[in-house]
Image (cartoon, rainbow, N blue to C red):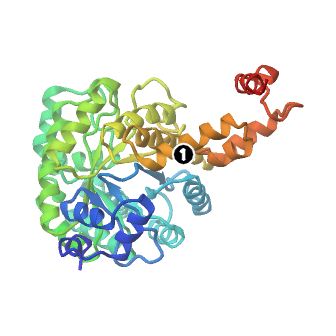
Amino acid sequence: MQHIEQARQSIITPAMREVARTEGVDEHFICRELAAGRIIIPRNRRRTGCRAVGIGNGLATKINANIGTSKDCASLDEELQKLDVAVGAGADTIMDLSTGGDLDGIRKEILRRCPVPLGTVPIYQAAIETVRSGKQLVDMDAEDLFRVIQRHAEDGVDFITVHCGLTRHAVELVRQQGRLMDVVSRGGSFTVAWMLHNQKENPLYEHYDRLLDIAAAYDMTLSLGDGLRPGCIADATDRGQIQELITLGELARRALERGVQVMIEGPGHVPIHQIQTNIQLQKSLCSGAPFYVLGPLVTDAAPGYDHITSAIGGAIAAAAGADFLCYVTPSEHLRLPTVEDVREGVIAAKIAAHAADIAKGRPQALERDRRMAQCRKKMDWEGQIQTALDPNRARQLRESRIPADRDVCTMCGEFCAIKVLSAEKKC
């Protein structure tokens, strides 16, 4: 029985209990929201030993870390290091976006090692296998794509990104309006190129019921991708993006009726003043389904620091109601990320998620900040380090310059505001 079906019968599963315990909420609340499609727990029925992670209404903001090989950098060992670093730094889920090397072997090994839900984008592998067979990418057919989706489901992948809402009508709207950056989603560009060449509708939209059958058989969550997400500030919230979102709302309804867990993917590059509007549109059009955003990046002009532009947008988006943040690394737009880039990206997203959870009034987030303030008032340096979102970094900086008076830091020394007032109160 699928997780949604169990929730509809008020059956509290071990996964629901685990999520409730982790989140500090009532397990019946998890059950009700799961049945309504406002919470998901991505876990393929073939997967064992995977942490239960709840994403959605009333829960802590979650973060995802992307890893995966490319044709130029196809080291499985390095990707496994990234996996360990990402999970260790606090990533709630991982996505394998590999496009180089033995794709089946890489995915299976990452699945074997990954203790949290794992996602993939099957169209990548379908396109790559088509090209490797000596054909053009646009020669891929629907059977190629559905065979790969079936393979990922059988392997135990917990959630897949599928660009089902990218229709010929939405593409025509983009053409009519004119975009500065056209289509920047890799899966979206594959889909658009295929539709334009073959003059056919997107097979994932046309054969959506077949996709639901596969997802239902494995209780695999669908992450409905935003193939027309804006790739620059100038393209944000245009007709193509919104038309795709409207379609995704309808597809989410059909998935819920079929008992398939679903979340909606969102933009992209969005200026600060449009972020809240984007969140409100998604929540309204998609009946409160969990919203998974890439960033959003609030400026195009900071290559090398896009983990920061993403964290700014992510904090605003999550405070406005987004549920799930996809991290961005300092390497975004420049190269395949290194292990250190992955760590920095996770920490930046973790800060954004925590800041949003404070705005949402999440008790655990508020308590963490209160605990930090108490440690600072007592000048309890070890307590501050242990409470930090990145204890290793905090310890490294503290120990790099320790003053003779270990109560203070080298910024203020004897003129530390807290110490000055503490001494005065003792007089």
Residue 133 appears left or right of 1 = right
Return the x and y of residue 150 as percentages of the image width and height: 29, 72
In this figure, what is the number of numbered marks? 1
What amino acid does circle 1 point to? Arg
Q: Quadrant of the N terminus?
A: bottom left
| Residue 336 makes an appearance in the image | no
What residue is drawn where x is 45% and y is 62%? 22
Front-lying residue, 89 or 213: 89
Seen at 47% across and 72% down, the residue is 108
> Which residue lies at the image location 48% right of the left edge and 38% below the top edge?
332
Q: Position of residue 325 (x, y in %)?
A: 40, 46
Determine which residue is flagged by label 1: 368
Residue placed farthest to the front in the image? 427
Q: Position of residue 78 (x, y in %)?
A: 61, 57
Residue 106 placement (x, y as % from top left):
50, 67
Image quarter where the C terminus lies is top right
As drawn, 202 above or below 284: below
Vertical order, 167 against 112 (above or below): above
Judge the density around disc 1: few (<14), some (14-19), many (≥20) Cα neighbours within 10 Å. some
Residue 290 visible to an observer of this rendering: yes
- The residue lying furthest to the right in this view is 404
Taking the spot 48% from the left edge, 45% from the top edge, the residue there is: 365
Tag 1's secondary structure? helix
- For this orientation, the residue located farthest to the top is 415
Frontmost residue, 322 versus 139: 322
Residue 5 image-quadrant placement: bottom left
| Residue 229 placement, left or right of 8 | right
